[in-house]
């Protein structure tokens, strides 16, 4: 009986800690996160890396992991983007697809999806997968961790 009661309490605690998709706040948060990603896409497609970076937390806690390297901190991540894309022409046109948003808590969400960069002939197109961990702060939802990997063509 004692073991059954512990399982019931454990299950109840777990279920109370989880949010459901019908939670109105979660629906609003999902819309906000999708709007953030849409804003980043527009900023990228304009060639504005600084505006694109507004979607990231401006902190040393930021972690960006690519295929071969991990950058820690806002300044290092911004420097990485500037080095990888020194000219607007190389940035191409960004598009996200297959987005899956999962809320881990009221303050944390995971976004999984695909990115697509369509570029001019002199630059190779790029596509890959990404996973983002976002955190809700007084400044809104911001990307805390970004793991992006290019797919081989």
Image (cartoon, rainbow, N blue to C red):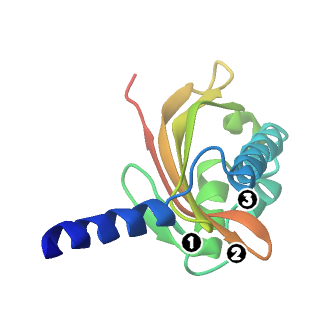
Note whether 72 is above or below 146 in the view shown. Answer: below
Which residue lies most toward the front here? 1
Residue of label 3: 55
Which residue lies most toward the top here? 121
Residue at 73%, 54% in the rendered image: 29
Q: CB atoms at circles 2 and 1 under 8 Å apart?
A: yes
The quarter of the image holding the N terminus is: bottom left
Residue 39 appears at what percent x and percent y? 81, 45
Residue of label 2: 58
Note whether 115 is above or below 18 in the view shown. Answer: above
Residue of label 1: 62
Q: Quadrant of residue 83?
A: bottom right
Residue 2 appears at what percent x and percent y? 16, 76
Residue at 71%, 63% in the rendered image: 141
- Label 3 crowd bin: few (<14), some (14–19), many (20+), radius 10 Å: some
State the separation of the CA atoms marked 2 and 1.
Answer: 7 Å
User: Could you say whether the residue bearing mark 2 is in a helix, strand or loop?
Assistant: loop
Residue at 69%, 38% in the rendered image: 91
State the separation of the CA atoms marked 1 and 3.
Answer: 11 Å
State the separation of the CA atoms marked 2 and 3.
Answer: 9 Å
User: Could you say whether the residue bearing mark 1 is in a helix, strand or loop?
Assistant: loop
Note whether 33 is above or below 3 in the view shown. Answer: above
Give 3 or 65, whichever is nearer the viewer. Answer: 3
Residue 9 appears at what percent x and percent y? 33, 71
């Amino acid at each position: 009986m004692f073991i059954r009661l512990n399982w019931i309490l454990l299950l109840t605690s777990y279920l109370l800690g989880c949010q459901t998709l019908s939670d109105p706040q979660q629906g609003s948060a999902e819309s906000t996160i999708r709007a953030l990603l849409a804003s980043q896409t527009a900023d990228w497609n304009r060639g504005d890396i600084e505006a694109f970076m507004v979607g990231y937390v401006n902190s040393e806690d930021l972690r960006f992991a690519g295929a071969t390297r991990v950058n820690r901190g806002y300044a290092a991540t911004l420097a990485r983007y500037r080095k990888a894309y020194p000219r607007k022409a190389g940035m191409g046109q960004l598009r996200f697809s297959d987005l899956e948003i999962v809320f881990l808590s009221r303050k944390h969400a995971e976004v999984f999806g695909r990115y697509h960069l369509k570029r001019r002939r002199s630059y190779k197109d790029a596509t890959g997968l990404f996973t983002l961990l976002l955190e809700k702060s007084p400044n809104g939802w911001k990307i805390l961790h970004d793991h992006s990997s290019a797919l081989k063509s």
